[in-house]
Image (cartoon, helix red, strand yellow):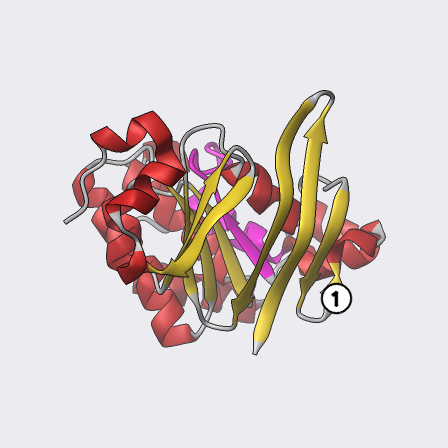
């Protein structure tokens, strides 16, 4: 079943076209990597899907709903189904790990409950279970500014999971991490997709990582999709089409 359908989506910033007639669909449970050089439009594309940025043209159909036509209240409700993981974590560092994770429930709360941080015992128990599953059981009450980069990103994953999402958007989730931490994060994202059936759409710059973990790869260059297919079909010629002169620095086994 198709969960996400992106149709002829374009985004302009004054005279610059960040996205140009982008088309692709995503099935439930797929793990898809979006690759391309810096400035290709990868982050803009993810942010258009959950309307952190408004596209200028096209349609974005998520779970049968046209995202671009929603008012603020309905968009807030829809976003509870779409988790978001950021390159620089986007955590509140003065708060504890569990407080940051519980922020993932804010989309379900009234404004007053959100301001005072009123969460149910069931929500707190769910947060604890997710943190334990992600190997953060000993860090639950630590401030987030005391954590390593890999631990911070796992908090970000936990925050998205407590939303009970149908899809998680990951914007360069390992770009700020060392190779060991990167492997942990990618392994956990893949497990989430396989075991929980949650669709993952991941922006990556590392071609070899995309090939290893993805069911499918979408290659973007200058705001346009230049490749869309199974990871096994990503050839050297295709990598050059996606990355241009940067392709010589990329290693693919």
Residue at the extreme front of the image, as rendered: 237
The residue located at (46%, 33%) in the rendering is: 93
User: Visible in this render: residue 143?
Assistant: no
Q: Answer whether residue 86 is magenta in the image.
A: yes
Closer to us: 91 or 34: 34
Q: In which image quadrant can residue 213 be found? A: bottom left
Image position, residue 77 (x, y; %) = 73, 60
Dot 1: element = strand
Left or right, 169 with reference to 78: left
Q: Quadrant of residue 250?
A: top left
Q: Nearer the viewer, residue 41 or 89?
A: 41
Mark 1, residue position: 65
Few, some or many residues within 10 Å of mark 1 (<14, 14–19, 20+): some
Residue lying at 51% horizontally and 36% vertically, measured from the top left: 92
- The picture places residue 230, in percent across and down from the top left corner, at 35, 63
User: How many dots with numbers?
Assistant: 1
Please tell me in which quadrant of the rendered image residue 115 appears.
Answer: top right
Question: Viewer-proximal residue, 41 or 138?
Answer: 41
User: Where in the figure is residue 204, as x and y percent of width and height?
Assistant: 37, 43
Q: Residue at x 32, y 37 (%)?
A: 240
Percent x, y of residue 166: 55, 68
Residue 4 falls within the magenta-colored stretch: no
State the extent of the magenta-drawn residues as a range.
82-105
Of all residues, the one furthest to the top in this rendering is 15
Q: For this view, does 17 lie left or right of residue 40?
A: right
Quadrant for the N terminus, please: bottom right
- Residue 23 against residue 249 in the figure, above or below: below
Q: Residue placed farthest to the bottom in the image?
A: 1
């Amino acid at each position: 079943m198709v969960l996400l359908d992106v149709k002829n989506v374009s985004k302009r910033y004054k005279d610059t076209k960040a996205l140009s007639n982008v088309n692709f669909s995503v099935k439930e449970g797929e793990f898809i990597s979006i690759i391309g050089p810096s400035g290709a439009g990868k982050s803009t594309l993810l942010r258009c899907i959950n309307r952190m940025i408004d596209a200028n043209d096209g349609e974005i159909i998520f779970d049968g709903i046209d995202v671009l036509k929603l008012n603020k209240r309905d968009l807030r409700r829809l976003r509870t189904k779409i988790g978001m993981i950021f390159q620089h974590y986007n955590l509140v560092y003065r708060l504890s790990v569990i407080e940051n994770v519980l922020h993932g429930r804010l989309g379900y709360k009234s404004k007053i409950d959100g301001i005072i941080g009123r969460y149910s015992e069931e929500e707190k128990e769910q947060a604890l279970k997710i943190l334990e599953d992600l190997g953060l059981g000993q860090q639950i009450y630590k401030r987030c500014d005391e954590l390593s980069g890999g631990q911070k990103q796992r908090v970000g994953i936990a925050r998205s999971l407590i939303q009970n999402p149908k899809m998680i958007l990951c914007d360069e989730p390992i770009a700020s991490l060392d190779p060991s931490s990167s492997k942990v994060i990618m392994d956990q994202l893949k497990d989430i997709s396989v075991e929980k059936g949650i669709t993952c759409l991941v922006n990556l710059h590392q071609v070899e990582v995309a090939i290893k973990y993805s069911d499918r790869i979408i290659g973007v260059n200058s705001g346009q999709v230049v490749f869309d297919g199974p990871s096994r079909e990503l050839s050297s010629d295709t990598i050059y089409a996606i990355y241009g002169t940067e392709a010589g620095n990329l290693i693919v086994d």
